[in-house]
Amino acid sequence: MKKLIQIFALSILSASATAGWFGDDNKATNTKQDAKTYTLKLAETWPSNFPIFGDTTKNFKKLAESMSNGRLKIRIDSKNKHKSALGIFDFVKSGQYDLGHSGSYYWKGKDINTLFFTSMPFDMTATEQHAWFEYGGGQELMDKVYAKHGIKSIIGGNTGNQMGGWFQKEINSVADLQGLKMRIPGFAGEIMAEVGAKPTNIPAGELYTALDRGTIDALEWVGPSLDLRMGFHKVAPYYYTGWHEPGTELQFLINLKKYNTLPKDLQTILITSMKLAAYDMLTRSNHESAKNWASMKKNYPNIQVKTFPKPVFDALRTANDKLLKKLAAEDPLSKEIITSRHNYLKKARAWTAISEQSYLNSQSK
Amino acid sequence: MKKLIQIFALSILSASATAGWFGDDNKATNTKQDAKTYTLKLAETWPSNFPIFGDTTKNFKKLAESMSNGRLKIRIDSKNKHKSALGIFDFVKSGQYDLGHSGSYYWKGKDINTLFFTSMPFDMTATEQHAWFEYGGGQELMDKVYAKHGIKSIIGGNTGNQMGGWFQKEINSVADLQGLKMRIPGFAGEIMAEVGAKPTNIPAGELYTALDRGTIDALEWVGPSLDLRMGFHKVAPYYYTGWHEPGTELQFLINLKKYNTLPKDLQTILITSMKLAAYDMLTRSNHESAKNWASMKKNYPNIQVKTFPKPVFDALRTANDKLLKKLAAEDPLSKEIITSRHNYLKKARAWTAISEQSYLNSQSK
């Protein structure tokens, strides 16, 4: 890189027309300061003191309050308080809350097009998807979907690549998936059902016992960052690598009417605080996963990390393609988003292949 | 992830003691606003309108000025103006400039310990290194190194994994490196010399011609994000994957004395703006690389992507280890930083191996 300092001799093209978000026509004019205090109420899907996810909203609050010198006050209500983990979208849409922190794919029953802004199976990694959101048209598509509901959605923090889950027995073929009782919700659950598994839902507090006693054969949760405290590694020997949520991005929700009442400087402070808290969550998730995986391996050296064999992936991918095709046929905006993701993934992955993937593989030989 | 909303029944441990930066004891008190305007001068290593790197300082400026409603004014001087690309460290140390944007490893001649905060060969990827900086002790070590010089250094944007460079002939063995004239500067150049290559330095404006005419046999630059406009793909057939800069992080420099004169809210605005601009640069670099690589492949389908064979990597790694061992023996703080990176890499890579690496490999089969 030292070379870069020498290139003033070269004629350099100016930057691409595509630009990320760095404030919306927010001229810095040092106009008379609006000294008014704005209190914004945020409802989050998570219970109080939920690690990592809950820290992301606390970090957002810290940044917004200190950068505004107290002109913004953020009041966070956790699940314990508002009692409706899956009520966040409606809370923000109706204006009962000004802000939310949740996951876009929870709202697919209300608007199918919210499904595509968290993570999709066999799709982009966290950093690939960040590039899609910020420079590949993803944010514009998300705006299109959420504007209808009077909401703005902003990236809300990434878990990193999620693990495929804990299994009591090895999966050597598609036949091994037949009748497999697995706790795996959402779109990935639909794919599993398509290939013959029996996706089930079980309350989180009963999962450990269900896996231990054989009520279920397998389950997926997140990854070492949050799996460690659940204790699944004590009762299931196989830890499968992931395919269904390669880079799960949470979301901040903003009531647009409320947003438009804020002075420009506070709008920029609000969104900047959300974005930095979001990027930091990926950094933190990677740290916690690395730390917790080291601890799991140390204390439970018999954990066996497995990857599905190719025919299993092929069957899952075929089911995924079939379900996506169905969604695309049902709604033109779904089709537009699926196509945008597909085309971006193709380009982004070709670069990942010759950069990080190639590097990692050359180092692990 | 749907499951996460159900776990309020579980007792959850509170978050790890390790915390990222979200403001320094910056109580939001809505105290009387300090209406004073602070003009901060920033010197950057890059020439005017340098793509991506230069956009990072412009994005930082936009955020800082709009969030402070004009109370912060950032004046950016590029290389064209201050005439000293490698003078940034001294500018900020002396207070001639308040801020800088450059690369930490440029200062190894002034303080060898600045070498370790950009990217090291065979070391962490961009996201692994972010985790080290923010949660693995990296920022604290960088503070220790820079505080001596009255400077604070903050992450300044990542290029992503850099390519190994453009070669006129294939490298099939260590013998092929003997006498190879390659433009590769810095620590990586020292490693190349150690295995028998002849690293040379050539002004950027002459590189294309030197590679075309055989004055040099190979060169490395960055990756598709910045290589495309240099045109090397028109004159060299082999594009090697990277090993020497797996996640190059630029830096923002802040004169500490000046920093301490700012009100708390502006301090938080300053650092938040830097960090968001920095994270965004990785996102942008990945986007530009993906886009440019697609364009290079389309117009020059004969470009051959190659990876060094294992014996070549082994020789380079042995040379790298030898040089690091020498550095560690010469300075206790160097030893501390090298050890911290080494231990963190080990943990972080074990997680990368079962998450992104495994996912990417399963998808490319």
Image (spheres, coloured by chain):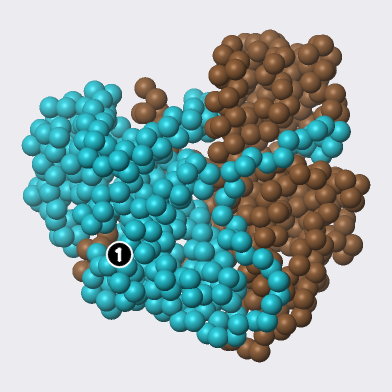
Chain colours: A cyan, B brown
Q: Residue at image x 31%, y 38%?
A: A335
Q: Position of residue A25 (x, y in %)?
A: 61, 61
Q: Nearer the viewer, residue A256 or B82?
A: A256
Residue B39's place in the image compared with B81, above or below, is below
Of the residues shown, which amino acid type is indicated by label 1?
Phe
- Using a 10 Å C-alpha cutoff, classify the residue at mark 1 as few (fewer than 14 neighbours), some (14 to 19) or many (20 or more): many
Q: Is residue B28 above or below residue A107?
A: below
Residue drawn at (64%, 15%) of the image? B238
- Is any atom of residue B195 visible in this view? no
> The residue marked by circle 1 belongs to what chain?
A
Would you say residue B54 is visible in this rendering? yes
Q: Quadrant of residue A172?
A: top left
At horizontal 52% and vertical 79% (from top left) the residue drawn is A72
Left or right of B318 in this view: A268:
left
Quadrant of res A109: bottom left
Residue toward you, A22 or B180: A22
Residue bearing mark 1: A89
Position in image of residue A13 (x %, y %): 73, 35
* Of the pair A121 and B182, the residue shown nearer to us: A121
**Residue A265 placement, left or right of A317:** right
- Please indicate whether residue A336 sits to the left or right of residue A7 in the image: left
Is the N terminus of chain A in the top left, top right, bottom left or bottom right quadrant?
top right
Which residue shows up at 8% across the image and 37% down it?
Answer: A179
